[in-house]
Amino acid sequence: MLGLETTHWRTVNPNDPLAVYILEACTAEPLTRAEETKLFEELGHSRDLDEQREHAMRRVVESHLMLVVKIARKHLAADVPVMELVQEGNFGLIKAVWCFAQKPSGDFAPMQSLASRTQSRVLSESK
């Protein structure tokens, strides 16, 4: 995605949370539309998390982490650290996954993008 390979782990400063986050996000395999649909079906309509549903949730979230970083970078404000924006974007992503799992319709990516942008924008405007 960013041209980073997992072999660069040794060159990343472990004290730089954004660099570590990006490298971890780069290791997540993107989902095909069919895989994403199947995972959302596994999430179903119940709010209870069993092991299979937790795996499905984690897989969907992990496959969209780089989009959260891209959105956070677009909403940078001088006084808001990018990791705070990423964190808010992650909250938006998780919320979007739950909402979409309850009422799946169409493609998930636009919903996820909107949720992460909204979370990041709210944080950047509140500071």
Image: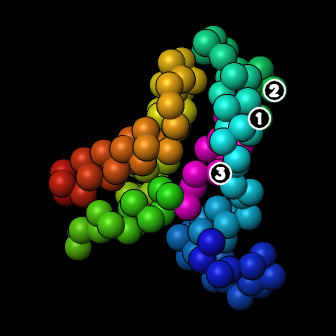
Badge 3 amino acid: Ser
Give residue 91's position: percent from left, percent from top. 46, 41
- Identity of the residue drawn at 50% across and 18% down: 103
Q: Please tell me whether mark 2 sits on a helix, a strand or a loop.
A: helix
Say what amino acid the circle numbered 1 marks.
Answer: His
Residue visible at 57% across and 55% down in the picture: 65
Residue 111, image x, y percentages = 43, 38
**Residue 54 at what x, y percent from top left?**
73, 30
For the point 50% across and 58% down, which residue is it? 67
- The answer to whether residue 67 shows anywhere in this view is yes
Determine whether label 1 and label 2 are within 8 Å by CB. yes
- State left or right for residue 32 relative to residue 74: right
| Image quarter in which the N terminus is found | bottom right
Residue tagged 1: 55
Crowding at dot 2, Cα within 10 Å, few <14 / some 14-19 / many 20+, comes out as few
Look at the picture and state if 30 lies above or below 12.
Answer: above
In which quarter of the view is residue 97 placed? top right
Dot 3 crowding, Cα within 10 Å, few <14, some 14–19, many 20+: some
Is 114 within the magenta?
Answer: no
Write the start and end of the magenta stretch as one range: 57-66
For the residues carrying marks 3 and 2, which lies nearer the camera in this image?
A: 3
Please, what secondary structure does the residue beneath circle 3 have? helix
**Residue toward you, 69 or 10:** 69
Report the residue marked by disc 3.
63
Q: Name the residue under label 2.
A: 52
